Image (tube, rainbow, N blue to C red):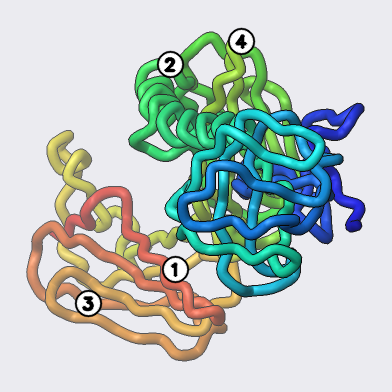
Amino acid sequence: MVDRISSLDAGYTVGDLSLFPEALDDKETLYEAANNAETILKQTLPYNGRTVIVESTEGFPDKGLIRIGSAPDGDGMFELIVYDKKTANTFQDIKRGFAGSRQNIWRAKESWVTNSVAAPHHNSIKDAVINMEVNAGLKTDPEPESLNGILTAQEVRFLAPKPQFRAFPIRGVPSLKVRFQNFSTGHIVRYLWDFGDGGTSLERSPIHEYVSEGLYTVKLNVITSTGAQGVATKTNYIEVNDDESAPFFYVESISDPYSVKTAATLTAGGTPTQPKEFMFVDQTDGDIVQRNWVFGDGNQETQEDADIHETSHIFTDPGEYIVTELIVFSNGRLKKVELPEPLVVL
């Protein structure tokens, strides 16, 4: 006799079913449960037999399913038989060949009879749970085509909050103070900011200071009064770099300070003069390795010596010129800067 759990045992509770030799009872596994009742045939059971005569029916339920065949631990043929009544040593009102098993002649004293009471009610419940999970959908990570998946998608589309934000400035030197403006919509009760440098905030529109150089990804998570959540992420949104100071240069006339005119000055009636040579002085901070000047008249100049901050250029013809400077830093970054207004040569 093998000690196994059965749904027929006194005190059985859901979760106690077993598949020998270890207890299993979860919705992922559908199985057959059996108790420990065993006996052998007392009389041979022919093909057309209508009563199963055994040594004893003790331990078997009043009606159920039995297995006739090789020993319980054997791999030979067997037949499943349903019975509706029993006596001390017989199973009666039988239905043979249950579940597609094969009817056979079973010899007395050679054929084992064991209780094979299935647990169809448990399996049916588990089947129903699985079908509900598939069709209705799990609470978390439901299949898109399930009911819960469809409802979740609609909730995200129409009811979930829509977090939106922007910041200023988004570039600068450390320490960089950035103000974040929150434009999120929905009945939001909580904000959670992740500034990408380990800093966080629960304020609606916080100010955060970045003290180290780097590229920072900013996330805003919002939660509504109904528990819906929304997340907005801006990757590498904030750039903090020592080379982020605003580049600029200015221009002076070498021979006559009044020769540098802007378009606005000319319109106002500035005094025209004819000097053509100008000095350009770069005042950009940072680890600069190269300066490239483009004078707007088809000429340009490259300065490889970072210690030289100025250059001069002679314009041969009067006109308005867009003068620009392309600055190369030691880390490979480029900065382009130009005068705020065209340079006017009279």
Going by the numbered disc 3, the residue's amino acid type is Ile
Identify the secondary structure beneath mark 4. Answer: loop
- In the rendered view, would you say 81 is above or below 202? below
Task: Read off the residue under disc 3.
Answer: 314
> Which is nearer the N-term, disc 1 or disc 2?
2
State the image coordinates of residue 216 (x, y, percent, origin top left). 60, 53
In the picture, measured across the screen, residue 121 lies left or right of residue 161, that is right
In the picture, measured across the screen, residue 345 lies left or right of residue 135, that is left
> Which is nearer the N-term, disc 4 or disc 3?
4
Label ID, residue 159: 2
Alpha carbon of mark 1 to alpha carbon of mark 4: how far?
Answer: 59 Å
Instruction: Please identify the quadrant where the C terminus is shown.
Output: bottom left
Residue located farthest toward the front when viewing the structure as drawn: 43
Alpha carbon of mark 2 to alpha carbon of mark 3: how far?
Answer: 66 Å
Task: Read off the residue under disc 4.
Answer: 225
> Which is nearer the N-term, disc 1 or disc 4?
4
> Which is nearer the N-term, disc 1 or disc 3?
1
Q: Residues within 10 Å of mark 1 (few under 14, many from 20)?
A: some
Task: Read off the residue under disc 1.
Answer: 281
Give the label, 4 or 3, closer to the camera.
4
Alpha carbon of mark 1 to alpha carbon of mark 3: how far?
Answer: 15 Å
Residue nearer the viewer, 319 or 165: 165
